Image (cartoon, rainbow, N blue to C red):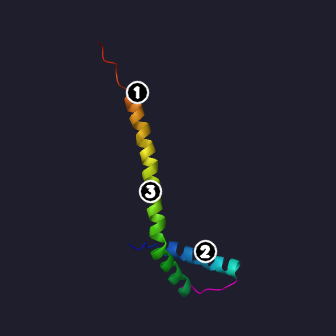
Amino acid sequence: MIQTFSRPMKDELVQKIKAYFQSELAQELGNFETEFLLDFLSEHLGPHYYNQAVRDVQKHLAGYLDNLNDKIDELEQPIPE
């Protein structure tokens, strides 16, 4: 699944990439080349970032559910003997 960006978001990302190449690598890229680079990075690196985010959310939710289960256990009433 290739991530697609809205036109305004893509334009903003293209400008950031161009600025980075200019300031850090002293190399000028045109909009056309930069959009191809963005598409390449999105296709090949995007899934790695996405999958890591999914794993991070899973860990966060697991911790939240553990805490919730502890709170629910605290609500139990003692059974009279």
43, above or below 59, in the image: below
Find residue 2 and report its image quarter: bottom left
Label 3 Cα neighbours within 10 Å, binned few <14 / some 14-19 / many ≥20: few
Amino acid carrying label 3: it is Arg
- For the residue marked with disc 1, what is the amino acid? Glu
Residue 63 magenta: no
Between marks 1 and 2 in the image, the one whose residue lies nearer the viewer: 1
Query: How far separated are the C-alphas under marks 1 and 3?
Result: 29 Å
Q: Quadrant of residue 12?
A: bottom right
**Where the N terminus falls, by quadrant?**
bottom left
Q: Nearer the viewer, residue 63 or 35?
A: 63
Q: Amino acid at mark 2?
A: Lys
Q: Residues within 10 Å of mark 2 (few under 14, many from 20)?
A: few
x and y, in percent, of residue 71 in the image: 42, 32
Residue 7, horizontal then vertical, whole percent: 48, 76
Residue 29 is one of the magenta-drawn residues: yes
Rounded to the nearest whole Å, what is the CA distance between mark 1 and mark 2?
51 Å
Q: Residue at x 40, y 42 (%)?
A: 65
As helix, strand or loop, the secondary structure at mark 2 comes to: helix
Q: Nearer the viewer, residue 28 or 52?
A: 52
Q: Residues within 10 Å of mark 1 (few under 14, many from 20)?
A: few
Quadrant of res 63: top left
54 left or right, relative to 80: right
Compared with 17, 66 (above or below) is above
Percent x, y of residue 80: 30, 14
Q: Earlier in the sequence, mark 3 or mark 2?
A: 2
Question: Which residue range is magenta in the image?
Answer: 26-31
Q: Nearer the viewer, residue 75 or 62?
A: 62
The residue carrying mark 3 is 55
Instruction: Return the residue at label 2.
Output: 16
The mark found on residue 74 in the picture is 1
> What residue lies at 49% left-to-right and 72% top-to-bottom?
45
